[in-house]
């Protein structure tokens, strides 16, 4: 039998939240180990932001997060802000830029953020165990016992930073939920978030020629709206506006899309009919929309081809397709392409200040595994930094 490795803190998960927590705890003089089942640490950081890591957002507020308890995130976000993380990035001399809407990216590579976290862990004396398979977790005398293929590892505190099941090719899974359930904690049912939406066969048949077409759009669902780019795909819709609204969409919901924001399509079409009566509807619509999209809408709602031949009622039907296109998605692309997982460990089980579970002393949950999910644009990384910092200060 291998002798147990003894630590003060054992962190399960070597991603953003886990490495942040480990470095902070180690910096306080704790003996810390990070166990990661994948061979490489921080794989989601590596692929994020097109390889440049959208590591935070200048405009982070609690309003940018979804949870059954919208107040839960406030303490952590105020305790370690986006400006605190930016200061750490600058300390490590990582050049960065604002892309749009407060989104900050590395100028060079997301590997710089990974290297920064690993440097911080190294300076804090954290022991890293990548490529280590976990077979069981239990609470024993004086702490927790994690049985792995490299032997037992024991810690007074145990931090679960295993994320959710989004992007399984990165090694993600629902492992953290199993541990939560093992200790009797409630789970808010998880589902894919920040994910493309799919069409049914009939709508796909009508829109098959639009794959690759992008428009600026205002997308609404369930009282929430986002105004960003929308992209037609060979499965349905994607792009920032769709990824954002997907976190608010549930099976059976309609979404309403304005594909010419700020333009009164009906007034514009009537003006075209008056000034260019012989013009084809598709040509007129192309002044408002990309050509292929204009052609599809003309075929769907125009009937007669010339502007002069269209009644007010027909123009109104076309304008509705432009400004108030109502769609019922068939579903989402699921965890395979989802950037995050909605739901997770119920925040009612945790202290919002320390992230320790209320019913199991010494057991902490941080990051995506918790029922807190950010909008697109660096907010989920900031949640990882903030929650990891809070737990690291208290383990």
Image: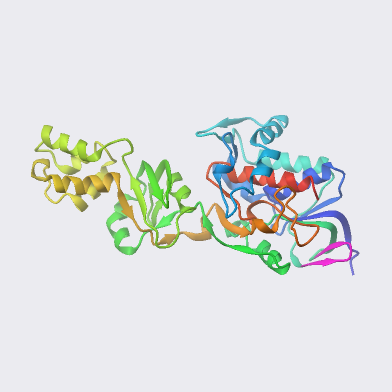
Residue 206 coordinates in the image, percent (x, y):
27, 57
Drawn side of residue 338 relative to residue 288, left or right: right
Q: Give above or below for 358 relative to 210.
A: below
| Res 20 seen here | no
Kindly identify the residue that appears in the image at 78 percent across and 43 percent down: 24
199 or 390, which is in the foreground?
A: 390
Q: How is the image coloured?
A: rainbow
Q: Let me know if residue 140 is in the magenta part.
A: yes
Q: Would you say 123 lies left or right of 38 here? A: right
Picture quadrant where residue 379 is located: top right
Q: Quadrant of the N terminus?
A: bottom right
- Image position, residue 351 (x, y; %): 72, 52
User: How far from the left and from the top, in percent, is residue 6?
Assistant: 89, 58
Compared to residue 117, the image places residue 8 above or below, namely: below
Tell me residue 196's x, y (percent): 45, 53
Q: Residue visible at 50% across and 51% down?
A: 194
Q: Is residue 102 placed above or below 313 in the rendered structure? A: above
Horizontal relation, residue 245 to residue 265: left or right:
right
Tell me how many marks there are: 0
The answer to whether any part of residue 226 appears in the image is: yes
Indicate whether residue 143 is drawn in magenta.
yes
Where does the magenta region start and end? 137-146
Which quadrant would residue 306 be assigned to in this image? top left
SS assignment for the magenta stretch, majority = strand
Residue shown at 26% from the left, 42% from the top? 291
């Amino acid at each position: 039998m291998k002798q147990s490795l003894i630590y003060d803190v054992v962190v399960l998960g070597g991603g953003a939240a886990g490495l942040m927590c480990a470095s902070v705890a180690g910096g306080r003089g704790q003996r810390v180990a990070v166990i990661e089942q994948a061979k490489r640490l921080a794989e989601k950081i590596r692929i994020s932001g097109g390889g440049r890591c959208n590591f935070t957002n200048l405009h982070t507020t609690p309003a940018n997060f979804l949870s059954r308890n919208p107040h839960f995130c406030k303490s952590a976000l105020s305790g370690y802000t986006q400006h605190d993380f930016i200061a750490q990035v600058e300390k490590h001399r990582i050049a960065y830029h604002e892309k749009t809407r407060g989104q900050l990216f590395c100028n060079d590579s997301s590997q710089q953020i990974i290297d920064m976290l690993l440097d911080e862990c190294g300076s804090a004396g954290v022991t890293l165990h990548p490529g280590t398979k976990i077979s069981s977790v239990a609470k024993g005398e004086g702490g927790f016992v994690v049985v792995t293929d490299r032997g037992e590892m024991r810690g007074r505190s145990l931090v679960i930073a295993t994320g959710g099941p989004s992007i399984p090719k990165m090694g993600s899974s629902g492992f953290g939920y199993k541990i939560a359930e093992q200790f009797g904690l409630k789970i808010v049912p998880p589902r894919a978030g920040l994910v493309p939406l799919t069409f049914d066969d009939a709508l796909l048949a009508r829109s098959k020629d639009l794959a690759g077409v992008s428009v600026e759009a205002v997308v609404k669902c369930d009282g929430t709206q986002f105004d960003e780019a929308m992209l037609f795909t060979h499965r349905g819709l994607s792009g920032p506006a769709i990824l954002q609204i997907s976190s608010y969409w549930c099976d059976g919901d309609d979404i309403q899309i304005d594909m010419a924001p700020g333009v009164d399509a009906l007034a514009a079409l009537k003006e075209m009919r008056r000034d260019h009566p012989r013009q084809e509807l598709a040509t007129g619509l192309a002044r408002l929309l990309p050509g292929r999209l204009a052609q599809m809408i003309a075929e769907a709602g125009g009937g007669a081809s010339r502007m002069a031949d269209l009644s007010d009622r027909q123009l109104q039907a076309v304008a509705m397709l432009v400004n108030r296109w109502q769609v019922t998605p068939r579903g989402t692309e699921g965890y395979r392409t989802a950037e995050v997982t909605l739901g997770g460990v119920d925040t009612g089980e945790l202290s919002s200040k320390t992230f320790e579970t209320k019913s199991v002393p010494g057991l902490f949950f941080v990051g995506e595994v918790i029922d807190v999910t950010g909008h697109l644009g660096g907010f989920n990384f900031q949640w990882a930094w903030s929650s990891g910092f809070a737990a690291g200060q208290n383990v």
